[in-house]
Image (spheres, rainbow, N blue to C red):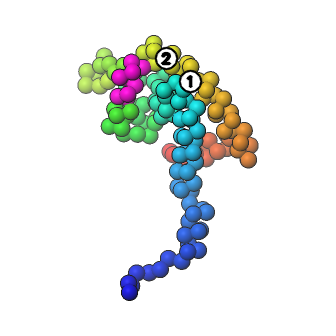
Amino acid sequence: MSNQPVIPFSTTLHVRDTCLCLHAQRAARALARRFDTALKSLGLTNGQFSLMMALNRPEPPPMGPVANLLAMDRTTLTAALKPLTRRGWVAIEPDPKDKRGKRLRLTAEGTAILSAALPIWASTHAAVEAELSSGNAQGLRQDLLEISR
């Protein structure tokens, strides 16, 4: 017989029903699956779409700001870039202002894939927003941004 304290099952149910972290993780996984399915015909995942969209800037960005935007460390960003560079969708180039740094550029092929993905993303996104029972997608975005700061 153990002397460990017993956590009542009612506590388990309370955490299940109220834990913001659990609900955010579940929602994130469900959204990821939905967008992965929608973008699959292009051979693109939701994460790759977000990464490539983050590179769609007037000037090729350095790795740091892209990693920050996507809430990932540089090692994770480097790993996420590998399949995109292998496919010729993203180029990693030396930073002309800092020889130790790298700049990330969408290639013409990457821009074409991103252009093809955009209407798929838009229609999937509109469908998700339409399913929100509150009808307040902007409020949800604002709440999520406040948490992620």
Secondary structure beneath dot 1 equals helix
Residue 141 falls in image quadrant:
top right
Is 105 within the magenta? no
Residue visible at 42% across and 31% down?
Answer: 66
Decide which of 62, 42 is in the foreground and name it. 42
Q: Is residue 126 above or below residue 92?
A: below
Residue 93 visible in the shown view? yes
- Outermost residue, front side: 41
Residue visible at 42% across and 20% down?
Answer: 89
Decide which of 12, 63 is in the foreground and name it. 12
Please tell me whether the stretch drawn in magenta is mainly helix, strand or loop.
Answer: helix
Report the disc number at residue 56. none
Q: How many marks can you see?
A: 2
**Residue 62 x %, y %:** 37, 26
Is 84 within the magenta? yes
**Residue 17 x %, y %:** 61, 63
User: Where is mark 2, residue-wise?
Assistant: 111
Q: Amino acid at mark 1?
A: Ala
**Residue 140 x %, y %:** 64, 45
Residue range (magenta): 81-90
User: Where is mark 1, residue-wise?
Assistant: 117
Q: Amino acid at mark 2?
A: Thr
* Marks 1/2: CA–CA distance: 10 Å
Label 1 packing within 10 angstroms: few (<14), some (14-19), many (20+): many
Decide which of 83, 67 is in the foreground and name it. 83
